[in-house]
Amino acid sequence: MSFGPFLLLALMEGMVTSAVLALAAVGLSLVFGIMRVVNVAHGEFFMLGAVSAWFVSQWVPGPPAVAFVAALILCPLFVAAIAALADMVVLKRLNYQPEATIVATIGLLYILQQAALSFYGPDARPVPAPFNFRVQLPWFGYSGYKIAVVAASALVLLGVWRLLAKSRVGLIMRATQYDRETARAFGINVDRVYAGVFALGGGLAALAAVLIVPIQQAHYLMGTDPLLLSFIVVIIGGLGSLRGTVIAALLIGLSDGVISTFFAPTLAKIVATLLVALVLVFRPQGLFGRRAL
Amino acid sequence: MLTLSGIDAGYGAVQVLRALTIEARTGEVLCVMGRNGAGKSTMLKTIMGLVPATAGSIVLDGLDVTGLPAHEVPRHGIGYVPQGRRLFAELTVAENIEIGLMTRRRGQRTREEVLTLFPRLRERLNQVSGTLSGGEQQMLAIARALCLEPKVLLLDEPTEGLQPSMIALIRDTVVALKATGVATILVEQRVDAVLSVADRVAFMTGGTVAETVDAAGLTPAAPQFAAYVGV
């Protein structure tokens, strides 16, 4: 294969990484942007999405596509419910103090991880893809499912953007983000907004995991990498900036695809981490973030 | 319309309000004066449920609203214009108004009424509210509170830092609202502004109301101003 098609393949692989990363990172970014909570357990919501997708694939009879669609709907809802519960039972009681919530979400990380180990076990298990056709390009064939993942992620991100920018719920979320006391004085139930945002963040991570699990197997430790990469993306893009998060996810995903293909995956991680260091030194608010209010 | 009796309130261990009793009547402007730290703003926040009352009761139109969750208080018809305006500064004028309308599910008719009151805001609906001039921001803060069609309106130093024409506009608005039967509590530092709109004046000191007098009998030289406000 000559260089051109090889580069195309690398970029396509990068797009899949970007798509999943963007979904996971947007969840993290929303939670920080609106609640000012650094959710260290975000990767575990991702893991729970993948693991619960495996359970759904075992329980739902019929062709893989049916089980997959069921997982795509049920798993994000299940994880969102756990996230909302964690918010109401733990974070709310800590009054959302920044340091306390970091420690609490570290605790949540271990609880969820060990729960997955107990109920799911230490094995990595595959979930069958809903369909298996290949798109035949002139130079190579490519998984149709991976292309569908990119499309699905783009649609969901568009939906999140519309929710935030155009809907009444989004208006309430933005008002709460800006000034929660005044929001209360205008009838906004801030507790409910916070539980909802935390659920939405967890649900988006779970959705990303359900999309990726036919490509990458479900495992109880799989949350670590997405957590690290989501943080990298969110720091580069600017915490709380949806546009920045998506652009940074594209940057990290595509460079990861290209560098992993032509050089080594380790070099891709080195470059990403170096990028974070440079952003932190020269533009601490991120590429698209605003300076602290 | 709104009665506070024997209210204690404060922030954590620091008690600010002590056995505070005050009453706002329908169609009346009650001005609240007092030195910095007398508890004027805290009183308004306590009415809104933003600062919890540890003793006493707050009764709105026969309904006990003491201890209600803060987001339920405005739904019973209390509009709040906080000190320093506290707009949702990154949202547009239209979005700030929308938040006000959502509080009591008011619709297009209320929106029209409020925008008719402040035509300047209608011209700037899509402008980000943080970029408005100080006076326009204050108009928006009042407009947002009026979107509730409040029975009681709480204004915390609305004329602070504004030019005279804007102060006159705000005074006219308060007078117009009075005619519609709204009970207004106006926290204000300036004697002339108080005397031009007030029906009664409550003087606060040390977290409680020391004296309430009819405005009709007050002149700028009244001893209360010297005793409680220091002017």
Image (cartoon, coloured by chain):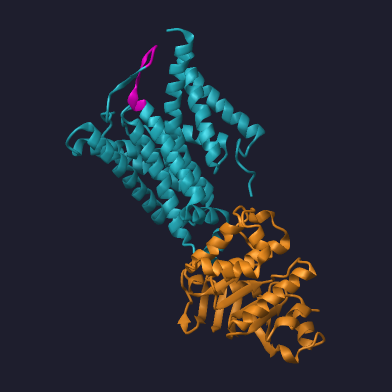
Chain colours: A cyan, B orange
Residue name at image x 67 percent, y 88 percent? B212
| Residue ranking furthest to the bottom | B217
Quarter of the image for residue B37 reads bottom right
Return the residue nearer the eye: A94 or A213: A213
Q: Quadrant of the C terminus of chain B?
A: bottom right
Q: Is residue A114 left or right of residue A177?
A: left
Residue B166 location, x and y as percent? 75, 69
Q: Is residue A169 left or right of residue B21?
A: left
Q: Does A144 lie within the magenta span?
A: yes
For the record, the magenta segment spans: A137-146
Q: Quadrant of the N terminus of chain B?
A: bottom right
Residue A169 location, x and y as percent? 46, 54
Residue A278 location, x and y as percent? 62, 29
Residue B56 location, x and y as percent? 51, 81
Residue name at image x 46 percent, y 81 percent? B63
State whether residue B83 is above or below residue A118: below
Q: Is residue A112 left or right of residue A121?
A: right
